Amino acid sequence: MCAPCTSEGLGSLDIPWQGSCTSASISGSRAPEEVRDGRSRSDPCGTAVSNLNDSIAFYTKYARMQVVHRRTVPTTGFEVAWISDKTRPFVIVLSERSQVDHPLVPPAHLGVACASREEVDRLCELARGEGRLINGPRDAGLPIGYLASIRDLDGHTLEVSFGQEVGLTIQQAT
């Protein structure tokens, strides 16, 4: 059993593989194609939150994320939600806890791409009105792009950006 499954109280549930664990101890699990071909891929990243419903609302509003999986951990009673923008097989795992001791603060952050500079500006105005804007928007040039940092309810940093050339940068590095 992998550490994330153990910490989420999954035990040895009889569930098919769902993208976050390739543990053979889960009955019926199988590694996805991107693991079977010998190359590793991004898997979920996760963070603790103090109020799952409020955090889901924040990430829906500011990052266009939707809940794709939700459950209550039997051993703790805390809730866990996987959120995704559904554009690729990647989720952010929000794990409810009684308190968040170590929020992601700059330079640590979760980042999402926006469709335009105007979308970054709109989110900044919304965040400014709610007292959540940390900095930006600013144009940091290539490959960083136009970006801003927004604080979520637990102090985690969400970076919203346009024109960040992640794909091109990776392609040029190979």
Image: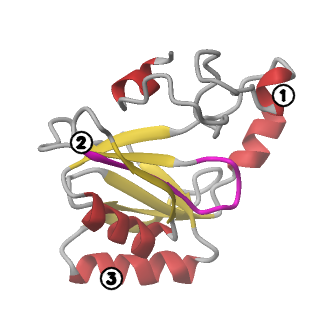
133 vs 30: above or below: below
Q: Which of 88 and 129 is in front in this view?
A: 88
Q: Residue furthest toward the right?
A: 37
Q: Which mark is residue 166?
A: none
> What residue is rendered at 20% in x and 53% in y?
154
Q: How many marks?
A: 3
If the image is split into quadrants, where does the C terminus sit? top right
Q: Earlier in the sequence, mark 2 or mark 3?
A: 2
Q: Earlier in the sequence, mark 2 or mark 1?
A: 2
The image shows residue 20 at horizontal and vertical percentages of: 58, 34
Residue 158 is a magenta residue: no
Report the Cα–Cα distance between label 2 and label 1.
33 Å
15 vs 120: above or below: above
Range of residues picked out in magenta: 78-90
Which class describes the residues within 10 Å of circle 3: few (<14), some (14-19), or many (20+)? some
Q: In the rendered structure, which amino acid carries the disc numbered 1?
A: Thr
